[in-house]
Amino acid sequence: MAVVRQFQGPIDLHAHSSVSDGTETPAELVRAAAGAGLGTVALTDHDSTAGWAAASAAARTARITLIPGMEFSTRVQYASVHLLAYLFDPADSALLAEMTRVRAARLSRAEQMVARIGMDYDLSWDDVLAQTTPGATVGRPHIADALVARGHALNRSAAFADILHWKAGYFQPHYAPDPLRAIELVRAAGGVPVIAHPATRGIADVVSESRLKTMVRAGLFGLELEHRENKPEPTARLYELATKFGLYVTGSSDYHGTGKPNRFGENTTAPEVLDRIIAEGHGSAPVYG
Ligand code: AMP
Ligand code: ZN
Ligand code: FE
Ligand code: FE
């Protein structure tokens, strides 16, 4: 018989540590979440589970519930689609192979972008490495930090708005699986897939009704409709489609430490929805700290 638990405090299911592009270690992140008054936090680094062990240990000490998770990079043509995945088996070989492939593609893509930026700005790959925790999933935020350190941008947001913007000509996409395949992989690994921030500009076309229907058939659990980057109009439309297809709705901060203005608990997920995630997720277990 399942143990029924009452979740104490706000639930925030999307946060990044230095294992990807957040600025705090997994343990620091968990302590910051507890300090901000959260009752439950999910660690969802890009394409990696390397922070789970340290985050679990910190959750036990900080008396906060940890949901192990990941934000899986997927792609539809040129549009990047982020898939949150919770409670999957981190040792599942098919999922692991795809995660490894994506991380490698992100690395060579970052090296190529930096080589191109380096033709116009004083910036080297070593500058990027100096901003990256060894083994971390590399992304544009690390290049942004290197640009800031070199004085080419004031902060991450300014770097994204300028040199890292696709209009600047240095942007390059990287390999990522189709979201349908990613949903299947996550479910096959016992995990629970939720599309992250699906209503940001451009993504509205990607998450059309017909595409959403195929994702639901493949095992999609829900949509992260409460997120600061979602735009009102596509969000309203996706709320209708969530009702139509029986999808759950989550809300989260997408915390990145000092790397983004997003604060813990600025958006939250209902306890009933977390109950369903825990009921359906069977590849790994929550840590009840
Ligand atoms: P990438 O996946 O390497 O293309 O980088 C995209 C990541 O950069 C996203 O997952 C965000 O976490 C981060 N990001 C995007 N825009 C911004 C911004 N304006 N400021 C800081 N971080 C950003
Ligand atoms: Zn990120
Ligand atoms: Fe994202
Ligand atoms: Fe994120």
Image (spheres, grey):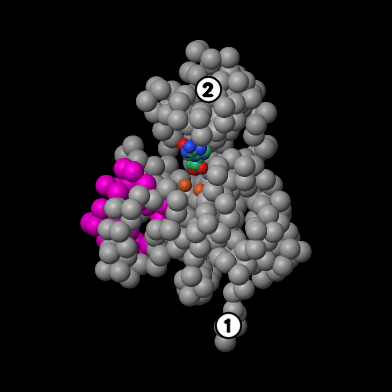
Please state the horizontal and vertical placement of residue 205, each as a whole percent of the image: 27, 47
Callout 2: SS? helix
Residue at image coords 27%, 64%: 240
Q: Which label belongs to residue 203? A: none
**Residue position for label 1:** 4
Residue at image coords 32%, 70%: 246
Q: Look at the picture and state if 243 lies above or below 112.
A: below
CA separation in Å, label 1 and label 2: 50 Å
The one nearer the camera, 67 or 186, is: 67
- Quarter of the picture containing the C terminus is bottom right
Q: Amino acid at mark 2?
A: Val
Furthest-right residue in this view: 61
Callout 1: SS? loop
Confirm whether the magenta stretch covers residue 115.
Answer: no
Instruction: Answer yes or no: disc 1 within 8 Å of ligand 4.
Output: no
- Quarter of the picture containing the N terminus is bottom right
Residue 12 appears anywhere in the view: yes
- Write the start and end of the magenta stretch as one range: 195-220
Residue at image coords 30%, 59%: 236
The one nearer the camera, 275 or 96, is: 275
Residue 182 appears anywhere in the view: no
Please state the horizontal and vertical placement of residue 93, each as a whole percent of the image: 53, 54
